[in-house]
Image (cartoon, rainbow, N blue to C red):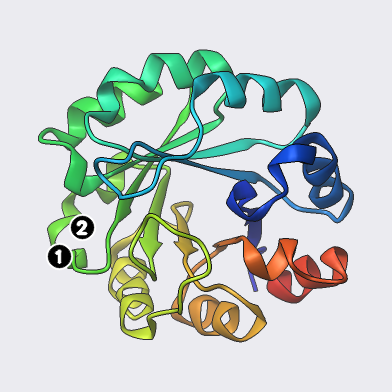
Amino acid sequence: MSKVIVSPSILSADFANLEREIKKVEDACADWLHIDVMDGHFVPNITIGVPVVQSIKKVTQLPLDVHLMIENPEKYVKAFADAGADILTFHYEAVSDVEKVVTQIKSYGVKAGMSIKPKTSPKEVLQYLPLLDLILVMTVEPGFGGQKFMEDCAEKITEIKSVAAEDLIIQVDGGINAQTARICTQFGANSLVAGNYIYKSSDVTQAIYSLKS
């Protein structure tokens, strides 16, 4: 079985002790660090911006997996790339020209990801898969942590997997725990984002290991 990339979401971390919280998952063998950027428009919540990503970059060796849940993401690509993002994932629903945004992201030497919301059919995005390094399937409505996993959304992975290149990263975010992770990897996902399941666990190392296995 191919290796599963685990990307803990700092949305569930203690923001008063962010460096310590990042070190905690780094020491527990996390692969990436997932950073949710929300603007209060594309999604109803507001989180963090460029300065925080810049600060995080200074305290971790982990690749920064930055998920832009924002309108007009193309306006902010350069700023987040300069801040240290290693992967920039925008929402299909937030752009009018997918190819242009992907080209823009890659021009900064950053991996390009695209995310789809629960109501978006995979058929709408299959044509773009060859352009991408990563596709993110949301299994909750984006905007808040701690929501319940929607298995019918995870079923989209099968369709994506059937046409995707071998090296495409198929990531899932929303309600991920040991049980739902198994569902997603059986469908063909090879990257998992988890917030509460990791950060609210009494044993972070074991939580991460359970997603990888």
The quarter of the rendered structure image containing the N terminus is bottom right
Q: Nearer the viewer, residue 123 or 207?
A: 207
Q: Secondary structure at mark 2?
A: helix
Relative depth, front residue between 195 and 82: 195
Q: Nearer the viewer, residue 195 or 77?
A: 195
What residue sits 67% from the left and 63% below the top?
3
Q: What kind of residue is marked 2?
A: Leu
As drawn, 11 above or below 98: below
List the residue tagged with mark 1.
123
Choose top left, top right, bottom left or bottom right for residue 163.
Answer: bottom left
Q: Quadrant of residue 37?
A: top left
Q: Residue at x 13, y 59 (%)?
A: 124
Q: Position of residue 91 (x, y in %)?
A: 28, 45
Residue 177 in the image, given as x and y percentages of width and height:
62, 77
Q: Are marks 2 and 1 in contact (CB under 8 Å)?
A: yes
The answer to whether residue 187 is left or right of residue 98 is right
As measured in the structure, the alpha-carbon distance from the residue carrying label 2 to the one carrying label 1 is: 6 Å
Q: Which residue is mark 2?
A: 126
Along the line of sight, which residue is nearer the eye, 137 or 4? Answer: 137
